[in-house]
Amino acid sequence: MLKFKLKTKYIMGKGFFNVPVAVNEPVMSYAPGSPERKAVQDAYKTMFNSKVEVPLYINGEDVKTGNTRTMSPPHDHQHIVGEYHIAEQKHVDAAIATALEARKSWSQMPWEQRAGIFLKAAELIAGPYRAKINAATMIAQSKTIHQAEIDASCEFIDFLRFNVQFMTDIYMEQPESTSDAWNRVEYRPLEGFTYAVTPFNFTAIAGNLPACMALMGNVVVWKPSDSQVFSAKVIMDVFKEAGVPDGVINVVFGDPVMITNTVMASPDFSGLHFTGSTFIFKELWKQIGNNIHNYKTYPKIVGETGGKDFIVAHKSADAKQVATAIARGAFEFQGQKCSAASRAYIPKGIWADVKKYLIADIASFKMGSPEDMSNYITAVIHEGSFDKLAKYIDGAKADSDAEIIAGGGYDKSKGYFIEPTVIVTTNPKYTTMETELFGPVMTIYVYEDEAFAETLTLVDETSEYALTGAIISRDRYAVEQATKALQNCAGNFYVNDKPTGAVVGQQPFGGARASGTNDKAGSAQNLLRWVSPRLIKETFVTPTDYRYPFLG
């Protein structure tokens, strides 16, 4: 367990309290023979061969509706690991009502008490729950142990620890005062309740979206993805053990349209924290706008959505570095990251070497169940994703302006397995250069060495998204040129690295354009969205005469 140093003191009514300095959780190796490898293997086997029942969680109670759906691993879709209960409208109404009731006490809870809860949650994940939350993520989201570790454990722990530090930093932001008047700002929780809608692909995001709002004193109705219920159950187990009070975070599963309509019909709806598809987010934004006259406040809207993330190589780039950036950036977790590289622009002069190295790397990938920790690739999340990806791969096989140089196979007989696939196109606006696929498919356009500037313009104009991107170059003038030319098409821009792997507290994450509101999860900027500041001015000697000197 990490030993925390103590830093800045923060004012409270009964003392000046120190907060632990947030440090990033070290990533365990899971090397053969390591204790953490054995722990997660044992947890995986136990959980895979058991049947878990996941109820709704409302007002601190497990709610079983009797209407259930099964959960199966994407890499073994005939195997059932459990079932979860589906909410009716009355359950969503109950979640809203109990959240509003809980707010009466929770919004008044001193910040250090809220901080203590979520710091405890971080330590529970770092210790006794680590193997369990990793195994749940491996089973139901088909992540390798490395991908589960950096997500479900490390990133989630980091969110919880750093958010506490960010909260106290925010509270310390105070206006100037004078001898005759004391100015102070309090950062109130939003009036009403908030709504968290979370994706399947990151357990850390699923946990952070409701947790960060609750940390700031808000109450939450949380709807996880149907494909992430298994690890969502572990998250709620952690929150309960950490001491999150009844009603503060309520969890409902089921029909997203019904749940959302019920939430957004409430006049007390005050904020949406969303990660998911661009189309859905825009529809939710529109729905909030249509309901705006019904709300007591203007709801805060925060969303991180899709991406069509790029790697641009300059003619000076090292070919092996480019190939590695693609092999990792495009194919880790089967490309199911909103930050995953899915289009690349490679100069002709280094293309032959990049191609050679990339094909060799892909040929060395092992694919199968995450239980076998020698596998680099596992299954995509569900049949809908599989069918979509297969369609685009078949299209590339048939199109005259596209060539598949690696992969191209797929098989869903046991699991939803798509081979890591590389398409080379002669058309820079080819469909897979523009469309977000959310799978292990990379499309490459080879450009003339001297057409770097034109290629940068092409990168900027090709996609509606602006989430992540990378420039790889040994020429610093080219790096500067790309950094400037691509300033609006990536909220997270990487120099000589793959465009994935943002770390909490180091690389605040988010994108613009169709990729979201760019409110930078992993920084204080995101937490500021979940408070409503109040300025208090206290005058010490109150005037008794209305007349100003200019009146004579």
Image (tube, rainbow, N blue to C red):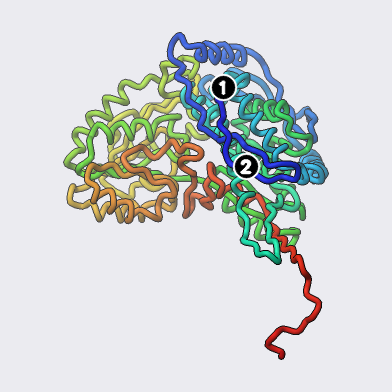
Q: Residue 264 location in percent, x, y?
A: 71, 51
Residue denoted by label 2: 9
Q: Amino acid at mark 1?
A: Met
Front-lying residue, 508 or 403: 508
Is 396 situated above or below 453? above
Residue at position x 74%, y 63% in the image:
538
Q: In terms of image quadrants, where is residue 445?
A: top left
Split into 4 quadrants, where in the image is the N terminus?
A: top right
Q: Nearer the viewer, residue 49 or 110?
A: 110
Q: Which mark is residue 280?
A: none
Whichever of callouts 2 and 1 sits on the residue coming sooner in the sequence is 1
Q: Nearer the viewer, mark 2 or mark 1?
A: 2
Can you identify the residue that label 1 sits on?
A: 1
Q: Secondary structure at mark 2?
A: strand
Q: x and y percent of residue 348 in the render?
A: 19, 42
Residue at disc 1, secondary structure: loop
Q: Residue at x 33, y 47 (%)?
A: 430
Classed neighbour count for the residue bearing mark 2: other residues with Cα under 10 Å, few (<14), some (14–19), many (≥20): few
Image spot of residue 168 (x, y percent): 62, 44
- The reply, left or right, for residue 429 in relation to residue 63 is left
- Foreground residue among 524 and 417: 524
Q: Nearer the viewer, residue 382 or 448?
A: 448
Q: Quadrant of the C terminus?
A: bottom right
